[in-house]
Image (tube, rainbow, N blue to C red):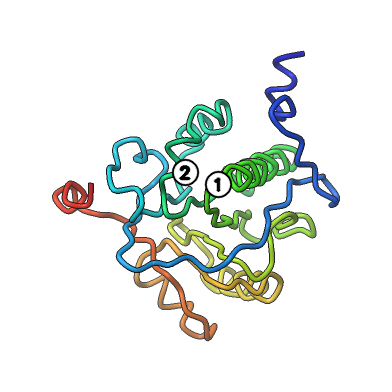
Amino acid sequence: MDKLMGVSNFHIADYSGANAYNLPEIMPSAPIDVDGVRYFGISEWSRIKDRGNAILHGFSYDYHVNRLWNNPKQYLSGLQKFRAVCTPDFSMYTDLPWAVKVYNAYKRQWLGRFWQENDVTVISTLSWGEGQIEDWTFDGVPKRSPVAFSLAYNNMDLELAVAEIKRILDLLEPSQIFVKGGKRKLDMLDGLGVEFEIIPLFVPSSKRKEEE
């Protein structure tokens, strides 16, 4: 029974939402003050000293972020010190079974709601498989709130990506948008007529030491 509860984290909290797959619903929130902010990946968070001036993004390999799901209480006090934390970008690869995608969306949404309930400022990460946006894909993601997504993927169909991003923006009407990606891919968003906060692809180690 304990192992079963750990699959859903029901033993900690039940955030079942009123949607098709009961994905937990993250509460709406105000735009984030990005003045003087630095960006770090979840895999780096434990060694960041000035967390009040850092936003922690969730674009990392699943094995880096699964520890937050497996032991959500263990990392809570550290996450509370950041200016904001993006929900994890659990895998949504096009060749994954749908059941796995729904479960990964559940984990993403559960952690976001759990963090919110425990005084963490949350940015909702938008995750989807290319060409595979379904009615449930963004269930539980609040409208008119900060969101984040990544364009840092190889072999993207850029035309399709722009069309999907436009569809998402029309659906969610985000108040603030954080995007991780290189210049060429970011330039393709210019025609959408919205402003983006840029999460750098890479920070040299010398600069990273200064930021820590």
- Tag 1 or tag 2, which sits nearer the N-term? 2
Whether residue 74 is situated above or below residue 58 in the rendered picture = above
Which is more toward the observer, 92 or 15? Answer: 15
SS of the residue at dot 1? loop
121 above or below 100?
A: below
Above/below status of 146 relative to 209? below
| Residue that label 2 marks | 80
Is 92 situated left or right of 8 in this image?
A: left
* Residue 39 picture location, percent across and down: 35, 55
Disc 2 and disc 1 in contact, CB within 8 angstroms: yes
Q: Amino acid at mark 1?
A: Asp
Q: Is residue 60 left or right of residue 17?
A: left
Residue drawn at (58%, 56%) of the image: 124
> Circle 2 sits in a helix, a strand or a loop, which is it?
loop
Instruction: Identify residue for label 1.
Output: 119
Q: Amino acid at mark 2?
A: Gln
How many residues crowd mark 1 within 10 Å: few (<14), some (14–19), many (20+)? few
Q: Quadrant of the N terminus?
A: top right
**Side of 167 where 85 appears, left or right:** left
